Image: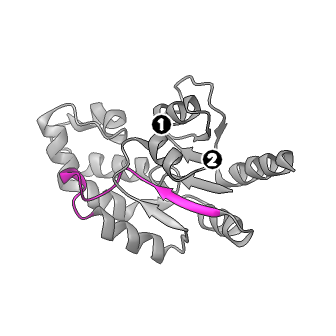
Amino acid sequence: MRIGIDIDDVITDTSSSMKNYILKYDKTGEVIKYIEDVMRGDAPTPNVEKFFIDNILNVFRNARLKENSSKVIQYFLNNGHEIYIITSRGDEKNIFKGSEELTLQYLKKNNINYTEIIFNCSDKAKICRDYHIDLMIDDSIKFCEEIRKENMKSILFTSVVNKSLPTTVERVDNWLELEEKINLMLKDKE
């Protein structure tokens, strides 16, 4: 099975890291009002965009790894599955300049192994189709629903940004639950 996995709020707890930076450095109080927009990659005002640009690499660098993410990813790799890290991070967007090298170092340091990493993904449904991804795990309802509309499977990883939003996409709250769901999917295929 080819499994696609997003980074922010799936492998890492990026929302908590972002919130810490906002509470520490947002002197205007404007950015905290838009935290959910910022976590979705939107910068609705010039001040929010500047804050995001000034702090995003440190947010990425200091985001904690989600519990069991490395272990579960390695489990699937060890059992013959391919892991594709599919992320919006990337140097093509000026807002994320320097994020590719930082991300590669972070993944290595935290023992996150993978088959391939794909940066600068704004159309994850297309990437999943092009790379023949069997299942995509993301915290974006929008991406998960777009992937599903293309008759591909997706699982929504619950995060601060999506937990109160309605969706018909199947959800998981943690990596052990995700491992169990994928194993059930694999068993059903047999």
Disc 2 marks a residue whose amino acid type is Leu
Q: Relative to 105, is 15 above or below?
A: above
Magenta-tinted stretch: 82-98
Residue placed furthest toward the top: 166
Q: Relative to 23, is 161 above or below?
A: above
Q: Position of residue 162 (x, y in %)?
A: 50, 33
Disc 1 marks a residue whose amino acid type is Phe
Residue at coordinates 85% horizontally, 45% vertically from top-left?
188
The mark total stands at 2
Most foreground residue, 82 or 169: 82
Does residue 67 appear anywhere in the picture? yes
Q: Relative to 75, is 89 above or below?
A: above
Is 46 part of what is drawn in magenta? no
The image quadrant that residue 148 belongs to is top right
Q: Quadrant of the N terminus?
A: bottom right
Residue at coordinates 69% horizontally, 64% vertically from top-left?
76
The residue carrying mark 2 is 135
Most foreground residue, 99 or 3: 3
Q: Position of residue 143 (x, y in %)?
A: 48, 36
Which label number is shown at residue 9?
Answer: none
Direction from residue 22 to residue 9 in the image, left or right: right
Q: Position of residue 105 (x, y in %)?
A: 39, 74
Does residue 25 appear anywhere in the picture? no
The answer to whether the residues at label 1 and label 2 have Cβ atoms under 8 Å apart is no
Assign a secondary structure to mark 2.
strand
The residue carrying mark 1 is 143
Direction from residue 176 to residue 93 in the image, left or right: left
Residue at coordinates 34% horizontally, 49% vertically from top-left?
18
Q: How is the image coloured?
A: one colour
Mark-to-mark CA distance, 1 and 2 = 12 Å
